[in-house]
Amino acid sequence: MMPGAIFGYFPSLDQSQREKLAALKSIYEDWNSRINVISRKDMDDFYIHHVLHSLAIAKIISFLPGTRILDVGTGGGFPGIPLAIMFPETDFMLLDSIGKKIKVVMAVAGELGLRNVFPLHKRAEEENGKYDFVVSRAVTEFTAFVKLTSKNLSAESRNSMDNGIIYLKGGDFESELDSLKSRVRIWNISDFFAEPFFETKKVVYCKK
């Protein structure tokens, strides 16, 4: 997949956003050769497995300017970096406990000139800041993640959706929802994107 296919899903992207998205793969290839944060197989499908997957969140909500978002377990910067390109007036704190991954995040954000990305080298348990949303790509079982990060959600909502957790997850996880079902909404990413990779992928939202 070439970045142009992403532009088809998001036709309102401006020239600066298109240029940044188009530059992502070469920047990650360069850094991945030094600090391995993406598998070789995933690098071959970089724009589908990482960029477009991250941007599924932009299909369920358009973050307002000034929104604060915490990306927990960001790894090399997903979903935070693509979302920061999509929403340049929204602040993204990208948190990971592994220093070399945060080094890559800092470098990528610097090369792209993303002034709305703020790397955090710490464990989720150690972060006590308040945010409108917490986002992540399946780092643990869902109810455990909700328990871990609910402390980081601020009380007052400003967006079209109440403050909450937005989680990218695959497969069958209904059993994980436990007592959260009344607070949860699920979208099939295959409703947004045609690529076979997304057939079992979901966006899960749990309001505060």
Image (cartoon, rainbow, N blue to C red):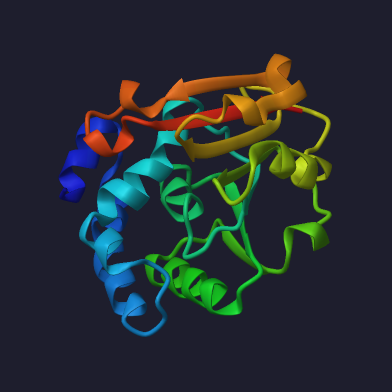
The image shows residue 33, relative to residue 144, as above or below, that is below
Residue 10: x %, y % from top left? 29, 33
Residue shown at 52%/63% (left/top)? Answer: 75
In front of the other: 207 or 21: 207
* 66 displayed left or right of 18: right
Residue 87: x %, y % from top left? 47, 42
Residue shown at 65%/31% (left/top)? Answer: 176
Residue located farthest toward the front when viewing the structure as drawn: 175
Classify residue 142 by image quadrant. Answer: top right
In front of the other: 184 or 93: 184
Residue 110: x %, y % from top left? 45, 71
* 93 displayed left or right of 178: left
The image shows residue 75, relative to residue 32, as above or below, that is above
- Whether residue 189 is visible here, answered yes or no, is yes
Classify residue 55 by image quadrant. Answer: top left
* 85 displayed left or right of 29: right
Q: Quadrant of the C terminus?
A: top right
In front of the other: 142 or 14: 142
Residue 135: x %, y % from top left? 59, 43
Residue shown at 72%/14% (left/top)? Answer: 182
Classify residue 28 by image quadrant. Answer: bottom left
Residue located farthest toward the bottom when viewing the structure as drawn: 34
